[in-house]
Image (spheres, grey):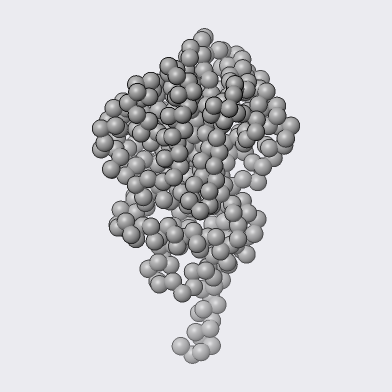
Amino acid sequence: MANLMDYLDWRGDLTFLQAPFNEVDNLILAELAFADLRGIVPGVGEGEGVALRDAAARYFADGRDKVLESSVLVPELIPSMLEKMCASVRFGSLILNCYEEHLDEVRAEQFAAITVELPKRSAYLSFRGTDDTLVGWKEDFDMALLDTVPSQLRAADYTKRAARRYKGWKLYLGGHSKGGNLAVYSAVNCGKAVQNRLIAVYNNDGPGFRETLVSREEHRRVADRIFTILPKSSVVGLLMEHEEDLIVVDSTQVGVMQHDGFSWCVRGPEFARMDDLTGVETNDKALKEWVNSLDQEQREKFTNALFEVLSASGAATLAEMRSQGTKSAAAILKAMVGLDKETRAALNYAIGVLFIKSGAQSLLDDWKRESRRRRKEREERKENRGE
């Protein structure tokens, strides 16, 4: 079955005037936000934009594409996608502007966004999803446990500033994974004047929200323009509440690996739809029930404890944790010594979820091996003491 890369081959010779913007174009521009374009594309209000093919030439000349080769989470096909976009009539001459990126370990904030200028005075504001950093993952857990996280506030502010930069233009908002959540949050909190300019808001397998947001009048004003697109075995996109209808698409991957947008099946100008929603509706039920069982204080204490434990490895990214192998797993388990049984059980569960959702199977395997080794050592010590 065809995917994003095939789509670029098929429709790359068609301009947006010949073939209107569609949901597959949306995902391509959402994935574009993962490219590191710092110092290449100007920030909001910092000047005129740069043609995509020129920005990509500097990106490859600097060797920035090599960073993704070691990433656990960010799709390694993004540089190849960028090459195909450059070679296409459809994307190559599009103007990129308003690049912004922030990483704040103290506030647990990971944020990046870029604006793509489209024909007929329209623009797509693309929000980056979770990257490889532990800071980014802490914010993801906070997103499931708290009403608001820093990147959501920054995304709404970015949308307002970009909207002023493109005064009178029609706007699309979108992102993949956490980026999809940021797009929806921004649409709800950008103000009525900007909301009136929104054409569509795309949440590509991103988590939903606590009920406090989906019940607001500001959300109802844009709900009919929010499109949540999920693969058939979605995990990430089913976290929390969605008011809008879901678009369920086929994928060439299995299980949690369907979160990878490059695995989504494309048929012409749209994704291949699925009719059976059974697996989608029941997936990740245990995680939802566990999150909902915690009160606010428990949620905050838990997320802080979780990432204090993860930070014990000394790694800043999942890729670094993977490269450390069992050393990283041993440091994490050591940091959990002294915690009460209930907290340890919750942390074990959450760390497993983190590694599974990131597709970091080797991390999960190391974690399980080290856990088994330590359990065996404890049992042997008990036997030696005659207990």
Q: Position of residue 252 (x, y in %)?
A: 51, 35
- Residue at the spot 44% in from the left edge and 24% down from the top edge: 163
Residue 38, quarter of the rendered image: top right
Residue 42, quarter of the rendered image: top right
Extreme residue toward the top, this view: 18
Q: Position of residue 90 (x, y in %)?
A: 58, 16
Q: Which is nearer the eye, 163 or 126?
A: 163
Q: In the picture provided, is 369 more to the left or to the right than 193?
A: right
Q: Is residue 335 above or below residue 105?
A: below
Q: Which is nearer the eye, 107 or 143?
A: 107
Extreme residue toward the bottom, this view: 386
- Residue at the spot 37% in from the left edge and 45% down from the top edge: 148
The reply to whether residue 267 is in sight is no
Residue 312, quarter of the rendered image: bottom right
Q: Is residue 318 above or below residue 328?
A: above
- Residue at the spot 30% in from the left edge and 53% down from the top edge: 292
The reply to whether residue 324 is in sight is yes
Q: Position of residue 280 (x, y in %)?
A: 37, 40
Q: Which is nearer the eye, 154 or 226?
A: 154
- Residue at the spot 65% in from the left edge and 33% down from the top edge: 39
Tally the numbered discs.
0
Q: Position of residue 68 (x, y in %)?
A: 64, 41
